[in-house]
Amino acid sequence: MSSKPSASTPRKVAVAGVALSDCGKVDDATPYALHAQAARRALADSGLDRSVIDGFASAGLGTLAPVEVAEYLGLKPTWVDSTSVGGSTWEVMAAHAAEAIAAGHARAVLLVYGSTARADIKAGRRTSDLSFGARGPLQFEVPYGHTLISKYAMAARRHMHQHGTTIEQLAEVAVQARANAAHNPDALYRDPITVDDVLSGPMIADPFTKLHCCIRSDGGAAVLLVAEELLADCAKSPVWVLGSGEHVSHTTMSEWDDFTVSPAAVSGRLAFERAGVRPDEIDLAEIYDAFTYMTLVTLEDLGFCAKGEGGSFVEKGRLLRDGALPVNTDGGGLSAQHPGMRGLFLLVEAVRQLRGEAGAGQVRRADGSLPSLAVASGTGGWFCSSGTVVLGRG
Protein backbone atom coordinates (compact mmCIF):
# COMPACT_ATOMS: atom_id res chain seq x y z
CA MET A 1 0.00 0.00 0.00
CA SER A 2 1.39 3.41 -0.93
CA SER A 3 2.04 6.02 1.72
CA LYS A 4 -0.57 8.62 2.59
CA PRO A 5 -0.15 11.99 0.82
CA SER A 6 1.00 14.88 3.00
CA ALA A 7 -1.63 17.06 4.65
CA SER A 8 -0.81 19.90 2.26
CA THR A 9 -1.49 17.76 -0.83
CA PRO A 10 -5.16 16.88 -1.42
CA ARG A 11 -5.69 13.19 -2.01
CA LYS A 12 -7.02 12.00 -5.31
CA VAL A 13 -10.38 10.25 -4.98
CA ALA A 14 -11.59 7.26 -6.95
CA VAL A 15 -14.64 5.03 -7.20
CA ALA A 16 -13.50 1.60 -6.07
CA GLY A 17 -16.77 -0.32 -6.07
CA VAL A 18 -20.28 -0.06 -7.47
CA ALA A 19 -23.31 -2.35 -7.42
CA LEU A 20 -27.06 -2.61 -7.67
CA SER A 21 -29.28 -4.71 -5.46
CA ASP A 22 -31.98 -6.82 -7.03
CA CYS A 23 -34.10 -4.37 -9.00
CA GLY A 24 -37.40 -4.15 -10.80
CA LYS A 25 -40.05 -6.25 -9.07
CA VAL A 26 -38.81 -7.23 -5.62
CA ASP A 27 -41.76 -8.23 -3.44
CA ASP A 28 -39.90 -10.20 -0.78
CA ALA A 29 -37.37 -7.67 0.53
CA THR A 30 -37.44 -4.63 2.79
CA PRO A 31 -35.72 -1.36 1.90
CA TYR A 32 -33.11 -2.15 4.56
CA ALA A 33 -32.41 -5.50 2.91
CA LEU A 34 -31.90 -3.80 -0.45
CA HIS A 35 -29.48 -1.35 1.17
CA ALA A 36 -27.53 -4.27 2.63
CA GLN A 37 -27.52 -6.27 -0.60
CA ALA A 38 -26.25 -3.33 -2.66
CA ALA A 39 -23.62 -2.47 -0.03
CA ARG A 40 -22.28 -6.05 0.14
CA ARG A 41 -22.08 -6.25 -3.63
CA ALA A 42 -20.28 -2.91 -3.95
CA LEU A 43 -17.76 -3.92 -1.31
CA ALA A 44 -17.18 -7.24 -3.08
CA ASP A 45 -16.77 -5.34 -6.36
CA SER A 46 -14.04 -3.21 -4.78
CA GLY A 47 -12.10 -6.13 -3.32
CA LEU A 48 -11.64 -4.22 -0.07
CA ASP A 49 -12.45 -5.32 3.45
CA ARG A 50 -15.36 -3.60 5.17
CA SER A 51 -12.98 -2.45 7.92
CA VAL A 52 -11.66 0.30 5.63
CA ILE A 53 -15.04 2.08 5.59
CA ASP A 54 -14.97 5.08 7.87
CA GLY A 55 -17.49 7.26 6.04
CA PHE A 56 -21.14 6.66 5.28
CA ALA A 57 -23.83 8.54 3.36
CA SER A 58 -27.50 7.67 3.10
CA ALA A 59 -30.88 9.37 2.81
CA GLY A 60 -34.53 8.54 2.35
CA LEU A 61 -34.95 5.79 4.93
CA GLY A 62 -35.55 5.95 8.66
CA THR A 63 -35.92 8.81 11.08
CA LEU A 64 -32.20 9.14 11.74
CA ALA A 65 -30.70 8.22 8.38
CA PRO A 66 -27.86 7.48 7.97
CA VAL A 67 -27.55 6.43 11.62
CA GLU A 68 -30.19 3.69 11.36
CA VAL A 69 -28.89 2.31 8.07
CA ALA A 70 -25.28 2.35 9.27
CA GLU A 71 -26.32 0.35 12.33
CA TYR A 72 -28.20 -2.13 10.13
CA LEU A 73 -25.07 -2.58 8.04
CA GLY A 74 -22.85 -2.96 11.10
CA LEU A 75 -20.90 0.23 10.42
CA LYS A 76 -19.73 2.87 12.90
CA PRO A 77 -18.48 5.69 10.66
CA THR A 78 -16.57 8.74 11.83
CA TRP A 79 -17.82 10.81 8.85
CA VAL A 80 -21.47 10.88 7.82
CA ASP A 81 -23.74 12.72 5.40
CA SER A 82 -27.53 12.73 5.26
CA THR A 83 -27.98 15.51 2.71
CA SER A 84 -31.46 15.21 1.21
CA VAL A 85 -32.20 17.37 -1.82
CA GLY A 86 -34.33 14.96 -3.84
CA GLY A 87 -33.06 12.99 -6.81
CA SER A 88 -29.77 14.87 -6.96
CA THR A 89 -28.93 13.82 -3.39
CA TRP A 90 -26.43 11.19 -4.49
CA GLU A 91 -24.37 13.41 -6.79
CA VAL A 92 -24.27 16.02 -4.02
CA MET A 93 -23.29 13.37 -1.48
CA ALA A 94 -20.58 12.06 -3.80
CA ALA A 95 -19.19 15.59 -4.04
CA HIS A 96 -19.19 15.95 -0.26
CA ALA A 97 -17.59 12.55 0.20
CA ALA A 98 -14.87 13.28 -2.34
CA GLU A 99 -14.09 16.56 -0.60
CA ALA A 100 -13.90 14.80 2.77
CA ILE A 101 -11.55 12.13 1.44
CA ALA A 102 -9.37 14.69 -0.34
CA ALA A 103 -9.06 16.65 2.90
CA GLY A 104 -8.16 13.56 4.94
CA HIS A 105 -11.39 13.43 6.96
CA ALA A 106 -12.20 9.94 5.69
CA ARG A 107 -10.52 7.31 3.56
CA ALA A 108 -13.43 5.22 2.29
CA VAL A 109 -17.02 6.48 2.07
CA LEU A 110 -19.93 4.21 1.23
CA LEU A 111 -23.01 5.73 -0.42
CA VAL A 112 -26.06 3.47 -0.36
CA TYR A 113 -29.76 3.64 -1.20
CA GLY A 114 -32.67 1.22 -1.39
CA SER A 115 -36.42 1.48 -1.88
CA THR A 116 -39.45 -0.76 -2.38
CA ALA A 117 -41.51 1.98 -4.01
CA ARG A 118 -43.28 -0.40 -6.43
CA ALA A 119 -43.87 -3.16 -3.90
CA ASP A 120 -45.30 -0.66 -1.42
CA ILE A 121 -48.02 0.34 -3.86
CA LYS A 122 -48.75 -3.27 -4.77
CA ALA A 123 -49.14 -4.18 -1.11
CA GLY A 124 -51.26 -1.13 -0.34
CA ARG A 125 -48.67 0.35 1.97
CA ARG A 126 -48.69 4.12 2.46
CA THR A 127 -46.52 6.03 -0.01
CA SER A 128 -45.35 9.61 -0.15
CA ASP A 129 -47.65 12.41 -1.26
CA LEU A 130 -46.32 13.82 -4.52
CA SER A 131 -47.68 17.24 -3.59
CA PHE A 132 -45.06 17.12 -0.79
CA GLY A 133 -47.58 18.35 1.76
CA ALA A 134 -48.87 21.81 2.57
CA ARG A 135 -46.10 23.09 4.78
CA GLY A 136 -44.24 26.36 4.49
CA PRO A 137 -44.24 28.08 1.10
CA LEU A 138 -45.85 25.05 -0.58
CA GLN A 139 -49.12 25.67 1.24
CA PHE A 140 -49.87 28.39 -1.29
CA GLU A 141 -49.53 26.02 -4.27
CA VAL A 142 -51.01 22.74 -3.04
CA PRO A 143 -54.67 23.91 -3.06
CA TYR A 144 -54.36 24.54 -6.79
CA GLY A 145 -53.26 21.00 -7.63
CA HIS A 146 -49.56 21.66 -8.05
CA THR A 147 -48.32 18.10 -7.76
CA LEU A 148 -44.77 17.24 -8.70
CA ILE A 149 -45.69 16.10 -12.20
CA SER A 150 -47.74 19.22 -12.90
CA LYS A 151 -44.73 21.38 -12.09
CA TYR A 152 -42.61 19.49 -14.63
CA ALA A 153 -45.43 19.68 -17.15
CA MET A 154 -45.66 23.45 -16.74
CA ALA A 155 -41.93 23.79 -17.32
CA ALA A 156 -42.10 21.61 -20.43
CA ARG A 157 -44.97 23.67 -21.84
CA ARG A 158 -42.96 26.85 -21.30
CA HIS A 159 -39.99 25.41 -23.20
CA MET A 160 -42.30 24.36 -26.03
CA HIS A 161 -43.83 27.84 -26.18
CA GLN A 162 -40.58 29.74 -25.92
CA HIS A 163 -38.29 27.60 -28.08
CA GLY A 164 -40.62 25.68 -30.37
CA THR A 165 -39.80 22.32 -28.86
CA THR A 166 -42.26 19.71 -30.09
CA ILE A 167 -44.00 16.89 -28.30
CA GLU A 168 -42.48 14.50 -30.85
CA GLN A 169 -39.00 15.63 -29.84
CA LEU A 170 -39.79 14.99 -26.18
CA ALA A 171 -41.15 11.57 -27.14
CA GLU A 172 -37.82 10.78 -28.83
CA VAL A 173 -36.19 10.86 -25.41
CA ALA A 174 -38.47 8.06 -24.20
CA VAL A 175 -38.04 6.04 -27.39
CA GLN A 176 -34.25 6.15 -27.23
CA ALA A 177 -34.18 5.38 -23.51
CA ARG A 178 -36.21 2.26 -24.22
CA ALA A 179 -33.86 1.29 -27.05
CA ASN A 180 -30.94 1.54 -24.64
CA ALA A 181 -32.85 -0.51 -22.06
CA ALA A 182 -33.19 -3.30 -24.61
CA HIS A 183 -29.47 -4.01 -24.12
CA ASN A 184 -29.78 -4.07 -20.31
CA PRO A 185 -30.98 -7.43 -18.96
CA ASP A 186 -31.80 -5.78 -15.62
CA ALA A 187 -34.11 -3.12 -17.10
CA LEU A 188 -37.74 -3.43 -16.06
CA TYR A 189 -39.04 -2.55 -19.54
CA ARG A 190 -37.16 -3.65 -22.66
CA ASP A 191 -39.73 -3.95 -25.46
CA PRO A 192 -39.27 -1.27 -28.14
CA ILE A 193 -41.64 1.71 -28.35
CA THR A 194 -42.26 4.32 -31.03
CA VAL A 195 -43.02 8.03 -30.99
CA ASP A 196 -46.63 7.16 -31.80
CA ASP A 197 -46.74 4.82 -28.80
CA VAL A 198 -45.63 7.68 -26.57
CA LEU A 199 -48.06 10.20 -28.05
CA SER A 200 -51.08 7.88 -27.96
CA GLY A 201 -50.72 6.87 -24.32
CA PRO A 202 -53.03 8.03 -21.53
CA MET A 203 -52.58 11.67 -20.55
CA ILE A 204 -51.06 12.13 -17.10
CA ALA A 205 -50.35 15.89 -16.99
CA ASP A 206 -50.43 17.90 -20.20
CA PRO A 207 -48.21 17.49 -22.24
CA PHE A 208 -46.99 14.28 -20.58
CA THR A 209 -48.60 10.99 -21.47
CA LYS A 210 -47.66 7.88 -19.53
CA LEU A 211 -44.48 7.07 -21.44
CA HIS A 212 -43.13 10.58 -20.91
CA CYS A 213 -42.96 9.68 -17.20
CA CYS A 214 -40.56 7.49 -15.26
CA ILE A 215 -41.50 4.00 -14.19
CA ARG A 216 -41.87 2.94 -10.58
CA SER A 217 -39.69 0.06 -9.45
CA ASP A 218 -37.94 -1.46 -6.48
CA GLY A 219 -34.18 -1.47 -6.11
CA GLY A 220 -31.04 -0.23 -4.46
CA ALA A 221 -27.55 0.92 -5.36
CA ALA A 222 -24.21 1.50 -3.67
CA VAL A 223 -20.98 3.31 -4.53
CA LEU A 224 -17.70 3.15 -2.61
CA LEU A 225 -15.37 6.15 -2.87
CA VAL A 226 -11.80 5.76 -1.62
CA ALA A 227 -8.57 7.65 -1.15
CA GLU A 228 -5.83 6.92 -3.65
CA GLU A 229 -3.63 5.07 -1.13
CA LEU A 230 -6.23 2.29 -0.91
CA LEU A 231 -6.19 1.56 -4.62
CA ALA A 232 -3.32 -0.92 -4.41
CA ASP A 233 -5.66 -3.26 -2.56
CA CYS A 234 -8.60 -2.78 -4.92
CA ALA A 235 -9.78 -5.45 -7.34
CA LYS A 236 -10.29 -3.12 -10.31
CA SER A 237 -8.77 -0.10 -11.98
CA PRO A 238 -9.98 3.20 -10.52
CA VAL A 239 -12.51 5.57 -11.96
CA TRP A 240 -11.50 9.03 -10.79
CA VAL A 241 -13.73 11.76 -9.44
CA LEU A 242 -12.49 14.69 -11.51
CA GLY A 243 -14.89 17.45 -10.54
CA SER A 244 -18.31 18.17 -9.10
CA GLY A 245 -20.81 20.94 -8.61
CA GLU A 246 -24.07 21.49 -6.77
CA HIS A 247 -26.80 24.12 -6.81
CA VAL A 248 -30.24 24.73 -5.31
CA SER A 249 -32.75 26.89 -7.10
CA HIS A 250 -36.24 27.18 -5.62
CA THR A 251 -39.13 25.41 -3.94
CA THR A 252 -42.03 27.66 -4.87
CA MET A 253 -42.66 27.87 -8.60
CA SER A 254 -43.09 31.64 -8.37
CA GLU A 255 -39.48 31.88 -7.19
CA TRP A 256 -38.12 30.07 -10.24
CA ASP A 257 -36.73 32.76 -12.49
CA ASP A 258 -36.94 30.84 -15.78
CA PHE A 259 -38.82 27.56 -16.33
CA THR A 260 -36.51 26.77 -19.26
CA VAL A 261 -33.31 26.81 -17.17
CA SER A 262 -32.59 24.09 -14.62
CA PRO A 263 -30.10 24.27 -11.72
CA ALA A 264 -27.82 22.00 -13.77
CA ALA A 265 -26.77 25.19 -15.58
CA VAL A 266 -24.82 26.08 -12.44
CA SER A 267 -23.82 22.64 -11.10
CA GLY A 268 -22.67 21.56 -14.56
CA ARG A 269 -20.56 24.64 -15.14
CA LEU A 270 -18.87 24.20 -11.76
CA ALA A 271 -18.25 20.48 -12.31
CA PHE A 272 -16.69 20.96 -15.74
CA GLU A 273 -14.55 23.88 -14.55
CA ARG A 274 -13.27 21.91 -11.56
CA ALA A 275 -12.61 18.83 -13.68
CA GLY A 276 -10.79 20.87 -16.31
CA VAL A 277 -12.79 19.37 -19.18
CA ARG A 278 -15.36 20.62 -21.69
CA PRO A 279 -18.77 19.13 -22.46
CA ASP A 280 -17.62 18.26 -25.99
CA GLU A 281 -14.97 15.97 -24.48
CA ILE A 282 -17.53 13.84 -22.64
CA ASP A 283 -18.13 10.34 -24.03
CA LEU A 284 -21.43 9.59 -22.30
CA ALA A 285 -23.93 11.21 -19.95
CA GLU A 286 -26.14 9.72 -17.25
CA ILE A 287 -28.93 12.21 -16.59
CA TYR A 288 -31.83 12.07 -14.17
CA ASP A 289 -34.94 11.42 -16.26
CA ALA A 290 -38.09 11.39 -14.17
CA PHE A 291 -39.72 12.98 -17.23
CA THR A 292 -38.59 13.38 -20.83
CA TYR A 293 -38.30 17.16 -20.52
CA MET A 294 -35.80 16.66 -17.70
CA THR A 295 -33.33 14.99 -20.05
CA LEU A 296 -33.75 17.59 -22.78
CA VAL A 297 -33.31 20.68 -20.64
CA THR A 298 -30.43 19.17 -18.63
CA LEU A 299 -28.54 18.47 -21.86
CA GLU A 300 -28.92 22.15 -22.73
CA ASP A 301 -27.87 23.35 -19.30
CA LEU A 302 -24.83 21.10 -19.14
CA GLY A 303 -23.63 22.73 -22.35
CA PHE A 304 -24.08 19.89 -24.83
CA CYS A 305 -26.18 22.19 -26.98
CA ALA A 306 -27.36 25.79 -26.85
CA LYS A 307 -30.44 26.89 -24.93
CA GLY A 308 -33.52 26.17 -27.00
CA GLU A 309 -31.78 23.62 -29.23
CA GLY A 310 -32.46 20.58 -27.07
CA GLY A 311 -35.36 19.46 -29.23
CA SER A 312 -33.31 19.12 -32.37
CA PHE A 313 -30.34 17.80 -30.38
CA VAL A 314 -32.18 14.69 -29.18
CA GLU A 315 -33.38 13.70 -32.65
CA LYS A 316 -31.86 11.14 -35.07
CA GLY A 317 -30.79 8.66 -32.41
CA ARG A 318 -28.20 10.94 -30.81
CA LEU A 319 -28.88 9.54 -27.31
CA LEU A 320 -28.53 5.86 -28.22
CA ARG A 321 -25.59 3.86 -26.87
CA ASP A 322 -24.04 4.06 -30.36
CA GLY A 323 -25.24 7.62 -30.97
CA ALA A 324 -23.28 10.86 -31.01
CA LEU A 325 -23.79 11.34 -27.25
CA PRO A 326 -24.96 8.19 -25.47
CA VAL A 327 -27.36 9.21 -22.69
CA ASN A 328 -28.86 7.00 -19.97
CA THR A 329 -27.22 3.94 -21.40
CA ASP A 330 -28.98 1.55 -19.01
CA GLY A 331 -32.43 2.78 -20.07
CA GLY A 332 -32.71 5.41 -17.37
CA GLY A 333 -35.63 6.06 -15.09
CA LEU A 334 -37.94 5.97 -18.09
CA SER A 335 -37.31 2.26 -18.75
CA ALA A 336 -34.69 0.61 -16.51
CA GLN A 337 -35.50 1.40 -12.87
CA HIS A 338 -36.73 4.29 -10.76
CA PRO A 339 -37.24 3.34 -7.10
CA GLY A 340 -37.62 6.90 -5.82
CA MET A 341 -34.37 8.86 -5.73
CA ARG A 342 -32.45 7.54 -8.74
CA GLY A 343 -29.28 9.63 -8.55
CA LEU A 344 -27.05 6.85 -7.24
CA PHE A 345 -27.96 4.61 -10.19
CA LEU A 346 -26.50 7.26 -12.53
CA LEU A 347 -23.11 6.95 -10.85
CA VAL A 348 -23.19 3.15 -10.95
CA GLU A 349 -23.92 3.08 -14.69
CA ALA A 350 -21.30 5.73 -15.48
CA VAL A 351 -18.61 3.75 -13.64
CA ARG A 352 -19.59 0.48 -15.31
CA GLN A 353 -19.38 2.12 -18.71
CA LEU A 354 -15.94 3.58 -18.03
CA ARG A 355 -14.72 0.20 -16.83
CA GLY A 356 -16.11 -1.59 -19.87
CA GLU A 357 -18.52 -3.68 -17.79
CA ALA A 358 -21.83 -2.78 -19.47
CA GLY A 359 -22.10 -5.92 -21.58
CA ALA A 360 -24.34 -5.60 -24.62
CA GLY A 361 -25.02 -1.97 -23.65
CA GLN A 362 -21.35 -1.00 -23.65
CA VAL A 363 -20.49 2.35 -25.23
CA ARG A 364 -17.37 2.53 -27.38
CA ARG A 365 -15.67 5.40 -29.11
CA ALA A 366 -15.34 5.60 -32.87
CA ASP A 367 -11.98 3.79 -32.73
CA GLY A 368 -13.44 0.96 -30.65
CA SER A 369 -11.82 2.06 -27.39
CA LEU A 370 -13.64 2.41 -24.09
CA PRO A 371 -15.02 5.79 -23.08
CA SER A 372 -12.68 7.98 -21.02
CA LEU A 373 -14.99 10.64 -19.59
CA ALA A 374 -18.53 10.48 -18.26
CA VAL A 375 -20.85 12.90 -16.50
CA ALA A 376 -23.63 12.05 -14.06
CA SER A 377 -26.14 14.81 -13.34
CA GLY A 378 -29.01 14.43 -10.90
CA THR A 379 -32.03 16.67 -10.41
CA GLY A 380 -34.13 16.93 -7.28
CA GLY A 381 -37.65 18.08 -6.52
CA TRP A 382 -39.12 19.97 -9.48
CA PHE A 383 -35.82 21.35 -10.75
CA CYS A 384 -35.19 22.49 -7.17
CA SER A 385 -31.66 21.11 -6.93
CA SER A 386 -28.88 19.70 -9.07
CA GLY A 387 -25.66 17.79 -8.52
CA THR A 388 -23.20 17.03 -11.30
CA VAL A 389 -20.13 14.78 -11.15
CA VAL A 390 -17.48 14.31 -13.84
CA LEU A 391 -15.76 10.91 -13.81
CA GLY A 392 -12.70 9.77 -15.72
CA ARG A 393 -10.75 6.61 -16.47
CA GLY A 394 -6.97 6.41 -16.43
Image (tube, rainbow, N blue to C red):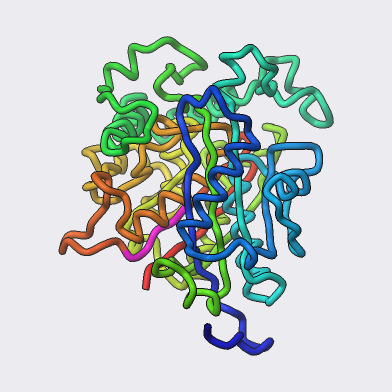
On screen, residue 192 versus residue 232, left or right, reads: left
- Classify the position of the C terminus by image quarter: bottom left
Q: Main secondary structure of the magenta part?
A: strand
Residue farthest along the right direction in this orientation: 136
Residue 147: horizontal and vertical position, in percent?
64, 21
**Above/below status of 364 relative to 243:** above
- Residue 49 lies in the magenta-colored region: no
Name the residue nearer the viewer: 337 or 325.
Answer: 337
Front residue of 281/65: it is 65
Q: Is residue 273 visible?
A: no
Q: Nearer the viewer, residue 172 or 354?
A: 354
Q: Residue at x 43, y 39 (%)?
A: 295
Q: For residue 373: magenta?
A: yes
Q: Which residues are magenta?
A: 372-376
Q: What residue lies at 26% left-to-right and 52% top-to-bottom?
A: 363
Where residue 373 appears, as percent x and y from the top left, is 37, 63
Rendered image quadrant of residue 392: bottom left
Q: Is residue 385 above or below residue 194?
A: below
Left or right side of 132 for 217 = left
Q: Position of residue 47 (x, y in %)?
A: 48, 64
Count all numbered tags in the image, as a single digit: 0
Q: Is residue 148 left or right of residue 281?
A: right
Identified at 54% across, 75% down, the residue is: 230
Tell me: residue 280, above or below residue 210.
Answer: below
Determine the residue positioned at 69% across, 21% down: 129
